[in-house]
């Protein structure tokens, strides 16, 4: 075998190996892109948060319902929120049951008790959830973070 033929075969083998490595990495890179950019494309976001409602806190359902987190759908199409969750830093979790959020609308998740409707749902808790310094995280039904908002300290920020 001549030196140029051996060199060509080595070059072909090297190119083939590079193609195989590149092809194997492409699906992983595409999957990372979808995972990292899912929340950026979501029409869902945390809207306003009222963690310390006006008036005196007396542990009544009325007082607890002045504490709420708004979830907004900025898109045109409705979104099924079944299995989506709102959580705080202490691990308290509200899970949406059978709820569809219309396009370009919002729902407030109140801490206390009440009757659910299209614009307000109730956690049915008997104690406050949201602290003066806290973080609320909205996750989809697979556990992926959709949006996060923090308040009450130097770490106050919005991520979404």
Image (spheres, rainbow, N blue to C red):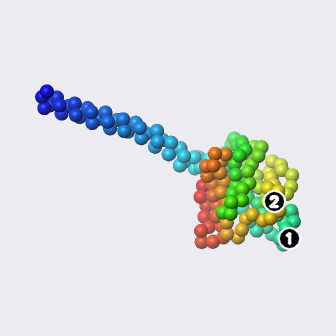
Tally the marks. Answer: 2
Q: State the image quarter where residue 25 is shown.
A: top left
**Local SS, label 1:** loop
Q: State the image quarter where residue 149 is shown.
A: bottom right
- Measuring from the top left, give residue 22's x and y in whole percent: 38, 39
Q: In this view, does 76 lie to the left or right of 26?
A: right
**Residue 58: mark:** 1
**Circle nearer the viewer, 2 or 1:** 2
Q: In this view, does 16 lie to the left or right of 159?
A: left
Callout 2–callout 1 Cβ contact below 8 Å:
no
Q: Dot 1, how many residues are within 10 Å of its Cα: few (below 14), some (14-19), or many (20+)?
A: few
Residue placed farthest to the left in the image? 2
**Local SS, label 2:** loop
Residue at 32%, 36% (x, y): give it: 17
Which one is nearer the viewer's eye here, 118 or 81? Answer: 81
Which one is nearer the viewer's eye here, 99 or 104? Answer: 99
Q: State the image quarter where residue 50 is shown.
A: bottom right
- Measuring from the top left, give residue 158's x and y in whole percent: 61, 61
Residue at 67%, 66% (x, y): give it: 134
- Does residue 135 appear anywhere in the picture? yes
- Does residue 43 appear anywhere in the picture? no
- Measuring from the top left, give residue 146's x and y in whole percent: 62, 51
Q: How far apart are marks 2 and 1 (CA)?
A: 14 Å
Q: Which of marks 2 and 1 is nearer the N terminus?
A: 1
Write down the residue under mark 2. 125
Q: In which quarter of the image is the N terminus?
A: top left
Residue at 77%, 43% (x, y): give it: 98
**Residue 18: mark:** none
Q: Dot 2, how many residues are within 10 Å of its Cα: few (below 14), some (14-19), or many (20+)?
A: some
Q: Quadrant of the C terminus?
A: bottom right
């Amino acid at each position: 075998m001549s030196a140029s033929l051996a060199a060509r075969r080595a070059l072909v083998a090297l190119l083939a190996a590079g193609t195989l490595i590149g092809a194997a990495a492409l699906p992983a890179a595409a999957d990372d892109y979808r995972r990292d950019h899912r929340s950026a494309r979501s029409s869902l976001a945390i809207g306003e948060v009222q963690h310390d409602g006006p008036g005196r806190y007396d542990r009544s359902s009325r007082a607890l319902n002045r504490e709420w987190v708004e979830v907004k759908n900025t898109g045109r199409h409705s979104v099924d929120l079944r299995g989506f969750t709102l959580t705080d830093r202490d691990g308290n979790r509200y899970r949406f049951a059978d709820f569809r959020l219309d396009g370009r609308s919002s729902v407030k998740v109140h801490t206390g008790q009440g009757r659910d409707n299209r614009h307000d749902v109730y956690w049915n808790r008997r104690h406050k959830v949201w602290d003066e310094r806290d973080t609320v995280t909205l996750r989809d039904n697979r556990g992926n973070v959709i949006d996060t908002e923090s308040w009450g300290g130097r770490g106050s920020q919005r991520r979404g």
